[in-house]
Amino acid sequence: MNKFKLGALVLAITMATAGCADMSETQRGTAMGAGAGAVLGGLVGGIAGPGGAGRTAAGAAIGAAIGAVGGNIWGKRQQDQKLAMERATAGTNVQVTQTADNRLKINVPADTGFATGRADINPALRPILDQLASTLVQNPAALVEVYGHTDNTGTDAINNPLSVQRAQNVAGYLGSRGVAPNRIVTKGLGSTEPVVANDTAANRAVNRRVELYTYERDPGQGQPQARAY
């Protein structure tokens, strides 16, 4: 297959998946899987034996079908987890969202997660973590990052270890519900990452939070590492 044909194939796949931002997660996973599969299928078809153009087109079609199935399976797992967590957090201030890089984010504010100045888990948070643990046990490929945050009341000598302990207590609770410790990474960020100004009691309560991110393990990925925030 010459460079012109390869370039045309890649361009076609790029255009086909360009609208992914407006799709649901399952549709986006399907489209991206189809695009990757089509490129790979086209390459294989063009290389393997005579009949270049026809073989390339056939390979692209087969690859797209296989890729679409793979992308849809990944997307549906994430979508199912998101729906389960939305049901579990209904009626609370816990926010469940999908990030731009396809991680599931669960934001637990102070009134649901922890009392002021304390790291022990509030009873209201336990059923939410129970549901999260259940989805993680069902999907062994998923990893978890847990980040603890405080407001700016007090000193770093108090806030930093408090944020670490909050994150570790959440991780420990998930572990007690069957999530392997090597699938969880924790980090305390103290008061360094406020989402709103620490100028009122209500805003400080927003900043006192724990954020959990779940995502699927890439092939060959080992122990999860805390991201730079």
Image (tube, rainbow, N blue to C red):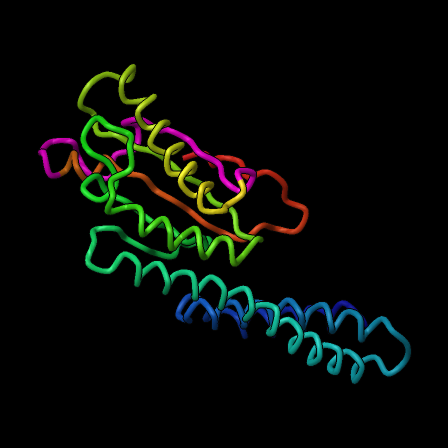
The structure residue drawn at horizontal position 25% and vertical position 34%, both measured from the top left corner, is 194
Furthest residue in direction left, as rendered: 200
Q: Is residue 139 magenta?
A: no
Q: Looking at the picture, does residue 48 appear above or below residue 165?
A: below
Does residue 8 show up? no
Where is residue 213? Give x, y as percent.
Answer: 42, 47
The quarter of the picture where the N terminus appears is: bottom right
Please tell me which residue lies in front, 64 or 104.
Answer: 104
| 150 relative to 22 in the view: left or right | left
The quarter of the picture where the C terminus appears is: top left
Where is residue 98? Give x, y as percent.
Answer: 38, 57
The structure residue drawn at horizontal position 24% and vertical position 40%, both measured from the top left corner, is 122
Q: Looking at the picture, does residue 212 appear above or below residue 75?
A: above
The structure residue drawn at horizontal position 63% and vertical position 44%, both measured from the top left corner, is 221
Q: Looking at the picture, does residue 210 appear above or below residue 54?
A: above
Does residue 226 show up? yes
Where is residue 207? Give x, y as percent.
Answer: 22, 36
Q: Which residues are magenta?
A: 181-202
| 198 relative to 98 in the view: left or right | left
The structure residue drawn at horizontal position 39% and vertical position 61%, both measured from the top left corner, is 82
